[in-house]
C-alpha cells in the first residue's frame, strides 16, 4: 500500500465514520442520496486523487481509487463516487479534460452517433437523476469511442436496483457531445478492467462489513444462557464467513497489484469470479446466523447483502469474464496455452 493510498483510506474512513449513519444510508430508499457526504469529498478534492496535477489532481493511480471504493462499499455510502471518479479517469486516459460537473459512467455498448449527436436508450445508468453528464461508449463508423455527453435535455426514467440505488433509464435525443475519443480494442479492454475492478473493490468492502456485523452479533446475542458464538453450528457459519472474507481480500490485493504492473486482465477476471461465489456463501451464512433480525429495517445487515446481490449482477459480471477468458483460451495456440497454464507471473 502506497503512502498516498494509506493516508487516503484513513482520511476517508474517518469521514465516513463521522457522517455515514444507518439513517444516511436509508435515504436512498426514498430516492435521496448522501449529498452532504458528497460535498465533503468534493470540497476536499479527494475525488481528484487519481487525476494528473495539471487537471487539479494528486497524480495518483487506479489503485488509489480502489482504496476509496473499498471503504465506500464498506460503509454503503449512497453517493456516485465510483461513477464520477472513474468517468474522469477514463476521460483523462483518452487525452481529454476531466469534467468539473457531477458525472456518471455507463460502459455498455449501444449508443449511436449521427451528425455529431448521440441518440440512444441507455438502461441501468447509475445515479443519472443526480448528475449532469454521462461518459459512455459509442460506435462511430464501426469504431468504438468514449463520448462525454450532457444530460440536460435527456429524458430520465427513475428506476432502481435491489438495494434501491438509482439505476435509471436515460433517453438521449440528439444529445450534445462535449468530448469524444476513438479507442482501440486494447484501451477498451483496459477500461472494462478498471470498471470491473472498481465494482470488485466495493464488493470486498461490503463483504468485510458483513463479516464484522455477523461476528459482533454472535458475541452480543445470547441464546439458552450463552453467546451465540459458543454454539457449534454458529461457529461453522463464522468459519465459512472468515474463509470467504480472507479469500476475497487476497483476491482484491492480487488484483490491485496486477493493475499497477499492467497485467490485470486475468486477475480482474478471476477476482470477479471468486467474488461471485463468495457472495453466495457470505450472504447465506450471515442471514442464517442473524435469522429474522437480519432482514428487518432496523438492522444494517440487509443494507450490505442487498447491495452485494445487486452489484454482482451489474456491469461486467462473472458470466462475462468466464466467457471472455474461455474464448481467449480457445483461440490461443497450443504453445500459448501451455505458457499461460505454467506462467508464474
Image (cartoon, rainbow, N blue to C red):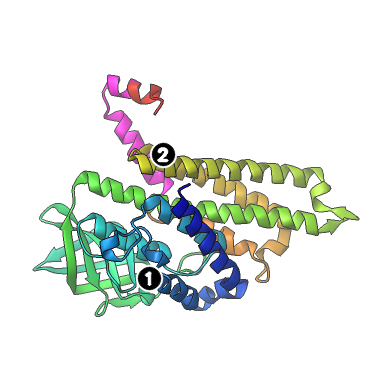
The reply to whether discs 2 and 1 touch (Cβ–Cβ < 8 Å) is: no
Q: Is residue 212 above or below residue 245?
A: below
Q: Is residue 18 left or right of residue 229?
A: left
Q: Quadrant of the C terminus?
A: top left
Q: Residues within 10 Å of mark 1 (few under 14, many from 20)?
A: many
Q: Tell which of 94 and 334 is nearer to you.
A: 94
Residue shown at the point (29%, 61%) measured from the top left: 53
Q: Which residue is the site of mark 2?
A: 267
Check residue 270 for magenta coloring: no
Q: Is residue 31 left or right of residue 260?
A: right
- Assign the magenta stretch its main secondary structure: helix
**Label 2: how many Cα within 10 Å (few below 14, some 14–19, many 20+):** many
Residue extent of the magenta highlight: 317-338
Task: Say how many tags the image has.
Answer: 2
Q: Is residue 30 above or below residue 166?
A: below
The residue lying at 48 percent from left, 59 percent from top is 8
Residue assigned mark 1: 168
Q: Position of residue 70 (x, y in %)?
A: 50, 55
Disc 2 on helix, strand or loop? helix
- Can residue 312 be seen in this snapshot? no
Q: Name the residue: 51% across, 46% down.
A: 275
Tag 1, which secondary structure? strand
Residue 255 is tagged as: none
Residue 69 position (above or below residue 254): below
Give the CA distance from mark 2 to mark 1.
Answer: 30 Å
Q: Nearer the viewer, residue 118 or 1?
A: 1
Amino acid at each position: 500500500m502506497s503512502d498516498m493510498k494509506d493516508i487516503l483510506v484513513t482520511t476517508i474512513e474517518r469521514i465516513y465514520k463521522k457522517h455515514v449513519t444507518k439513517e444516511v444510508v436509508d435515504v436512498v430508499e426514498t430516492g435521496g442520496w448522501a449529498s452532504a457526504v458528497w460535498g465533503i469529498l468534493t470540497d476536499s478534492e479527494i475525488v481528484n486523487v487519481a487525476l494528473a496535477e495539471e487537471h487539479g489532481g494528486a497524480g495518483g493511480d487506479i489503485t488509489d481509487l480502489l482504496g476509496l471504493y473499498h471503504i465506500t462499499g464498506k460503509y454503503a455510502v449512497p453517493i456516485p463516487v465510483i461513477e464520477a471518479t472513474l468517468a474522469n479517469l477514463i476521460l483523462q486516459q483518452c487525452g481529454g479534460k476531466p469534467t468539473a460537473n457531477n458525472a456518471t459512467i455507463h460502459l455498455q455498448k449501444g449508443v449511436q452517433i449521427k451528425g455529431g449527436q448521440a441518440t440512444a436508450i441507455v438502461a441501468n445508468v447509475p445515479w443519472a437523476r443526480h448528475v449532469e453528464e454521462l461518459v459512455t461508449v459509442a460506435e462511430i463508423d464501426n469504431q468504438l469511442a468514449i463520448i462525454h455527453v450532457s444530460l440536460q435535455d435527456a429524458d430520465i426514467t427513475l428506476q432502481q436496483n435491489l438495494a434501491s440505488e438509482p439505476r435509471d433509464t436515460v433517453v438521449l435525443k440528439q444529445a450534445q457531445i462535449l468530448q469524444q475519443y476513438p479507442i482501440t480494442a486494447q484501451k477498451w479492454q483496459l477500461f472494462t478492467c478498471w470498471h470491473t475492478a472498481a465494482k470488485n473493490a466495493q464488493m470486498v468492502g461490503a463483504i468485510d462489513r458483513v463479516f464484522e456485523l455477523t461476528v459482533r452479533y454472535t458475541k452480543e446475542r445470547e441464546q439458552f444462557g450463552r453467546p451465540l458464538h459458543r454454539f457449534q453450528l454458529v461457529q461453522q457459519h463464522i468459519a465459512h464467513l472468515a474463509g470467504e472474507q480472507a479469500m476475497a481480500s487476497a483476491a482484491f490485493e492480487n488484483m490491485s497489484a496486477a493493475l499497477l504492473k499492467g497485467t490485470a486482465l486475468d486477475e480482474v477476471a478471476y477476482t470477479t469470479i471468486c467474488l461471485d461465489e463468495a457472495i453466495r456463501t457470505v450472504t447465506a451464512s450471515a442471514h442464517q446466523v442473524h435469522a429474522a433480525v437480519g432482514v428487518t429495517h432496523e438492522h444494517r445487515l440487509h443494507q450490505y447483502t442487498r447491495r452485494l446481490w445487486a452489484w454482482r449482477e451489474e456491469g461486467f459480471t462473472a458470466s462475462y469474464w468466464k466467457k471472455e477468458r474461455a474464448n481467449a483460451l480457445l483461440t490461443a495456440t497450443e504453445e500459448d496455452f501451455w505458457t499461460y497454464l505454467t506462467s508464474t507471473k
